[in-house]
Image: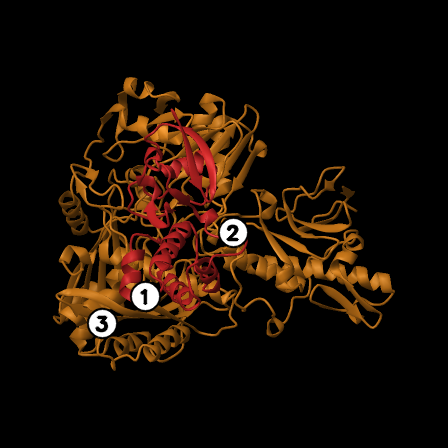
């Protein structure tokens, strides 16, 4: 077991864990931040997506020992107070059904738009295709991203 | 706390709440209460609470798996109660038999609760009116309600102010219901009550729950389905820091209840997952296990050669074939398909000697409680079930095998346990959609089908769980085109294998629809007719009630079926596009669907350009939710049709995660336009009907695009995607 100080959603949090523990389980089980979800454990479904220095990564694939000084943002820290434009768009378009994949979808979309505020349809498809939605909300996710873009979807 | 006024056999119980509110409890089993009846705010069957400030809490009584019942069912109550939807707060109910059935399956949520929820809302509105009338010394008929207020010539008073007085009154068993033309809530688009919570990552799911003092567990299961555990070596696993125990979980009598495995318990879930990889287990494979897909195919062929059990025979099929040489036949194959629900299986069991508290995602909380009682010996009245929002069900969470595992572990260790499966275990322990083989033969008299002979062999889920009859929904005798062909026969042979099977979204029908509606397309071609005209001919111009002996029946109406066909034909510009279009239509479980898929061929591969689907489900409660259900069913089916099957190597699944078990991604997901028929008929279900119809519509479009008749799913097998 090793002690780590990690920047999570703007605050430094202390954890004690085995160094190979994926950030997914640090967030969920040690820090009780349940918004980041477990879907496959092998980086194939995107449910565990977080931001590392603003870039979307799969938290099941990065061990706590690899974080260092990088800033971690989870769905809980995507916005403070009011909703992030991407979350607002998700509400406007009534995107979720079961909702389980949606934290990951939103985090991927938010990272995309912060790097590329006006992506093409192709770029959106490519960026989002790492996130599986089993309920079939893809048509509404596409609409929500389009809505977020027109409203200026990054912050 | 406040006393009830009398003991009464009433489907609702009303009581006051401290602070001056009104609480309504369901009592659908007609139980009389004991001698000192009290209901308080924490009464677990409290269904509706009207607070003294006028706000209203309605409980969500069925598990929500994404089908939207947390929103649609309270909408029905709120409508009859005549309160503004904005004043409603929805809270999750727990399991209580007084609520009546609390399960999710068969597309039944709205359909079966529509009447009793309207009655509940209306009965409460009536006692509020009575209370106001008494206060004003006027007749209740001189009062009306609007927006949570009772209004009369004497003034207006909001429900919160009346709640305490109303709580002393007796609700009617037969309240007057609203005229549907005056609905303000039912039929209007309402945001899901959990929408903001879902987009902000709130801990809504079973996997997100924790209980004090809990430890974690996971399970190791065999690579070959149905193997028995003969022994294991956990020495290396025990070396890990935080490991608590490793032991055998024994199978229960039926494989649908629990199978043999090894439980790994630790203080952290990550430790459980690591430890699992270090365990060496020995398994005894079942006799005659299916080692390859080819073996399965040859078993199906044998099954189809058997006469089978004749489930329906209209006219005389054999005579007709003897005298009519104009025949056509085809064989269709469907694979095992995984449920792949995004939230992995998990459950928390806290077994404490004389009581147990269960927490987690289950479509059948009542059944989870019954099983837990059987496993632990604890009387069922002492078992609490807190069921959560579910990250996808699709029929997988009708089985409580994972809950039974958690209960077993907690009971053995005498401490609370949170069980979580890894994704790989989900593929080793799914109850797959049964695989099957469908042989169809028809005789044609120019453009008319004069005989149809259908032989079906599937790995029936009824046979697997030892239920009868073995055919169940695998070969439903009233499914179209039954009743539309003068000589018609269905015969069924079940195949028992070691591969676990269960209910997956429209069980049985999700496979037969593919075979039947693809075959009709082939018949239309043989008749030289447009496929839609061909089906309309078969259905007939005259309005008829076709027998349908299943839920959604007892009949279906051909005018409504023609209605969705005409609607989708119109909306899809049938015959006038530069895409290849495929069509299919039927009624299932009370809902009529007609689907047209537009496909194009790009570099030898098929791409779906768009899907149009027309739906008649009777009255729509929440248009946003209804639209989502239909889009979701179609999109789910596209994934299965394009990619999904269980491939076996030496009896084990080749795909044990999403790297090899391909799911539809956003880049391949087309637009799905949903067109509802506006209807005042009783509401029917939407969870399932849009799923089966996509398969033949897509495959028929693929034929138009490529000239290839696909008779075995998925399309990936034929290099078409």
A118 on left or right of A97: left
Q: Quadrant of residue A24?
A: top left
Q: Quadrant of residue B37?
A: top right
Dots 1, 2 in contact, CB < 8 A: no
Task: Using the rendered image, report if marks 3 and 1 lie on a common chain.
Answer: yes
Q: Is residue B521 above or below residue A54?
A: below
Q: Which mark, residue B480? A: 1
**Residue under pointer 2:** A80
Front position among marks 3 and 1:
1
The residue lying toward the viewer, choosing from B141 and B262, is B262
Q: CA distance from mark 3 to mark 1?
A: 15 Å
Q: Residues within 10 Å of mark 2 (few under 14, many from 20)?
A: few
Residue B611 falls left or right of residue B183: left
Residue B450 numbered tag: 3
Same subunit, labels 1 and 2: the answer reads: no
Answer with left or right where residue B447 lies relative to residue B126.
left
Q: Chain of mark 2?
A: A
Query: For numbered disc 1, what is the local secondary structure?
Result: loop
Q: Quadrant of the C terminus of chain B?
A: bottom left
Image quarter of the N terminus of chain B: top right
Q: Colour of chain A?
A: red
Residue B440 can be seen, yes or no: yes
């Amino acid at each position: 077991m090793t002690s780590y100080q990690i920047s999570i959603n703007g605050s430094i949090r202390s954890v004690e864990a085995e160094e190979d523990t994926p950030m997914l389980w640090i967030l969920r089980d040690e820090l009780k931040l349940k918004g980041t979800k477990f879907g496959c454990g092998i980086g194939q479904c995107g449910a565990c997506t977080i931001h590392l220095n603003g870039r979307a990564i799969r938290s099941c694939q990065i061990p706590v020992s690899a974080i260092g000084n990088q800033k971690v943002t989870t769905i809980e820290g995507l916005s403070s107070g009011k909703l992030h434009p991407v979350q607002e768009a998700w509400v406007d378009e009534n995107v979720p059904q079961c909702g389980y994949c949606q934290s990951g979808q939103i985090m991927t979309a938010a990272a995309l738009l912060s790097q590329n505020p006006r992506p093409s349809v192709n770029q959106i498809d490519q960026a989002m295709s790492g996130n599986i939605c089993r309920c079939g909300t893809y048509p509404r996710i596409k609409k929500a991203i389009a809505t977020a873009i027109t409203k200026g979807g990054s912050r | 706390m406040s006393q009830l006024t009398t003991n009464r056999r009433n489907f609702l119980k009303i009581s006051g709440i401290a602070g001056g509110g009104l609480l309504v409890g369901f009592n659908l089993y007609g139980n009389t209460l004991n001698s000192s009846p009290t209901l308080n705010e924490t009464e677990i069957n409290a269904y509706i609470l009207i607070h003294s400030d006028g706000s209203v809490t309605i409980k969500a009584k069925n598990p929500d798996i994404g089908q939207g019942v947390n929103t649609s069912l309270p909408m029905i109550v709120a409508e009859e109660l005549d309160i503004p939807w904005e004043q409603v707060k929805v809270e999750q109910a727990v399991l209580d038999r007084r609520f009546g059935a609390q399960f999710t399956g068969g597309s039944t949520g709205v359909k079966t609760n529509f009447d009793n929820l309207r009655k509940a809302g209306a009965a409460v509105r009536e006692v509020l009116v009575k209370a106001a009338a008494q206060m004003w010394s006027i007749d209740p008929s001189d009062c009306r309600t609007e927006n949570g207020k009772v209004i009369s010539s004497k003034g207006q008073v909001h429900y919160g102010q009346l709640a305490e007085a109303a709580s002393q009154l007796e609700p009617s068993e037969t309240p007057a219901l609203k005229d549907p033309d005056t609905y303000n809530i039912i039929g209007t688009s309402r945001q899901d009550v959990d929408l903001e919570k879902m987009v902000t990552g709130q801990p809504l799911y079973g996997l997100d729950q924790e209980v004090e003092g809990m430890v974690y567990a996971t399970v190791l299961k065999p690579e070959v389905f149905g193997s028995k555990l003969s022994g294991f070596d956990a020495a290396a696993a025990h070396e890990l820091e935080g490991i608590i125990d490793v032991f055998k979980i024994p199978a229960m009598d039926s494989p649908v209840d629990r199978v043999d495995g090894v439980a790994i318990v630790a203080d952290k879930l990550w430790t459980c997952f690591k430890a699992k990889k270090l365990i060496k287990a020995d398994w005894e494979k079942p006799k005659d296990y299916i080692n390859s897909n080819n073996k399965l195919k040859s078993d199906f062929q044998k099954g189809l050669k058997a006469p089978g059990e004749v489930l329906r025979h209209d006219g005389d099929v054999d005579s007709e074939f003897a005298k009519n040489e104009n025949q056509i036949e085809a064989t269709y194959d469907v694979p095992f398909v995984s449920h792949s629900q995004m939230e992995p299986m998990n459950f928390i069991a806290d077994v404490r000697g004389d009581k147990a508290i269960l927490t987690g995602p289950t479509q059948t909380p009542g059944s989870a409680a019954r099983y837990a009682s059987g496993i632990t010996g604890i009387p069922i009245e002492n078992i609490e079930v807190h069921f959560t929002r579910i990250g996808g069900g699709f029929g997988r969470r009708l089985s409580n095998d994972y809950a039974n595992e958690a209960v077993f572990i907690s009971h053995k260790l005498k401490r609370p346990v949170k069980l979580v499966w890894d994704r790989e275990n989900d593929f080793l322990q799914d109850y797959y959609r049964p695989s099957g083989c469908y042989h169809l033969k028809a005789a044609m008299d120019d453009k008319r089908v004069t005989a149809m002979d259908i032989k079906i062999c599937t790995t029936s889920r009824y046979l697997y769980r030892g239920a009868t009859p073995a055919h169940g929904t695998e070969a439903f005798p009233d499914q179209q085109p039954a009743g539309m062909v003068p000589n018609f026969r269905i015969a069924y042979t079940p195949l028992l294998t070691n591969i676990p099977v269960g209910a997956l979204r429209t069980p049985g029908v999700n496979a037969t629809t593919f075979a039947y509606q693809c075959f009709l397309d082939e018949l239309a071609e043989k008749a030289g007719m447009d496929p839609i005209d061909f089906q309309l001919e078969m259905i007939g111009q005259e309005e008829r009630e076709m027998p349908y002996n299943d839920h959604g029946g007892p009949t279906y109406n051909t005018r409504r079926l023609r209605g969705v066909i005409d609607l989708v034909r119109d909306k899809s510009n049938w015959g006038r596009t530069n895409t290849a279009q495929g069509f299919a239509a039927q009624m299932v479980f009370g809902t009529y669907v007609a689907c047209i898929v537009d496909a194009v061929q790009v570099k030898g591969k098929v791409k779906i350009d768009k899907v149009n689907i027309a739906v008649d489900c009777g009255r729509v409660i929440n248009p946003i939710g209804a639209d989502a259900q239909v889009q979701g069913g179609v999109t789910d089916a596209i994934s299965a049709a394009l990619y999904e099957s269980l491939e076996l190597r030496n009896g084990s699944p080749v795909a044990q995660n999403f790297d090899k078990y391909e799911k539809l991604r956003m880049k391949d997901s087309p637009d799905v336009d949903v067109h509802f028929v506006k209807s005042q008929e009783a509401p029917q279900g939407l969870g399932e009907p849009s799923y089966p119809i996509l398969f033949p519509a897509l495959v028929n479009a693929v034929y138009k695009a490529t000239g290839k008749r696909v008779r075995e799913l998925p399309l990936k097998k034929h290099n078409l995607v």
